[in-house]
Image: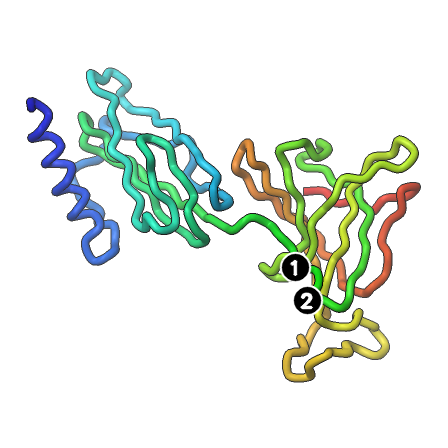
Amino acid sequence: MRHLGRYCYLFILAAALTSCGDLFEFEGYTSDLNKITLDRDSLYLMVGDTYHFTTTFDPDTLRNDAVYWMSDDVNIATFRNDTLIAVSEGTVTITAISIEHQCYATARVFVSYGWYMMEKYYPFDMVVNASVTVDGQPLNEHQQVGAFVDDELRGIGVARTFHDISYTEFRIYSLYKPYDPGKGLYPIYEDDAPSDPEKVVFRVYDRETKNLYESADSLIFDGETHGYPSRLYDIAL
């Protein structure tokens, strides 16, 4: 019962913070000598993934390092005890409130659905056989790579081996006939035709670190095969 008053305070504070759907900045609760910091200020998760934030306090002479966790949209991401769980696609702000220090910190969390292709809806494709590296290192078992046009997933990388050569194969899909610089696009539906060639970028999601990487260079959807096991197309992220 001795903690009842403190939890009532947190309940009232949480209600004030989330009033009208916005997070209010409550002055007087943070200072250089009274600060909480999270290990990440932004995070990328897929639905079903979890993350446990690490908190740092300044000063670190705490009698009570308990933290109250909040999400401004529990339909996108919610907490179970101290663990964040991605629920559905969207963007959410999470807030950590120190009980003893009466200070707080926030982070933005971006949630997407798992990468999954419905190939049968796309009549055209192109193939890319690539050597994919992230920060100079080859892909590992925790990393998934996809091909995107704008934010639409158009292909998923598949690990292949040919005569002891390991590489990633992409079959990238489109609703439109491949781009021909001399003739332009040949859309199935004229009204839906993009005015410019479709540009493919590559992204890697690391389920271990919860980081999302994107290639600096893009590739035009042209219906050709790019790269072969003997001479792979280089994708560096």
Q: Is residue 210 above or below residue 93?
A: above
Q: Answer with the quarter of the image where residue 230 lies.
A: top right
Residue located at (68% from left, 78% from top): 193
Q: Judge left or right: residue 100 versus residue 207.
A: left
Residue located at (19% from left, 43% from top): 14
Q: Is residue 223 above or below residue 61?
A: below
- Please identify the quadrant where the C terminus is shown: top right
Viewer-proximal residue, 51 or 36? Answer: 51
Q: Is residue 165 above or below residue 114?
A: above
Marks 2/1 in contact by CB < 8 Å: the verdict is yes
Residue located at (64% from left, 79% from top): 192
Viewer-proximal residue, 24 or 85? Answer: 85
Q: How is the image coloured?
A: rainbow
Circle 2 SS class? helix
Q: Is residue 42 above or below residue 18?
A: above
Q: Answer with the quarter of the image where residue 164 lies.
A: top right
Residue 131 at x, y = what percent? 79, 41
- Please identify the quadrant where the N terminus is shown: top left
Circle 1 SS class? loop
Q: Which residue is mark 2?
A: 121
Q: Can the viewer see residue 152 in this picture?
A: yes
Q: Judge left or right: residue 217 versus residue 81.
A: right
Residue 153 at x, y = what percent? 63, 57
Q: Which mark is residue 118?
A: 1
Badge 1: residue crowd in 10 Å (few <14, some 14–19, many ≥20): few
Instruction: Please identify the residue farthest to the bottom as the structure is shown.
Output: 190
Q: Judge left or right: residue 29 versus residue 156.
A: left
Q: Judge left or right: residue 85 versus residue 197.
A: left
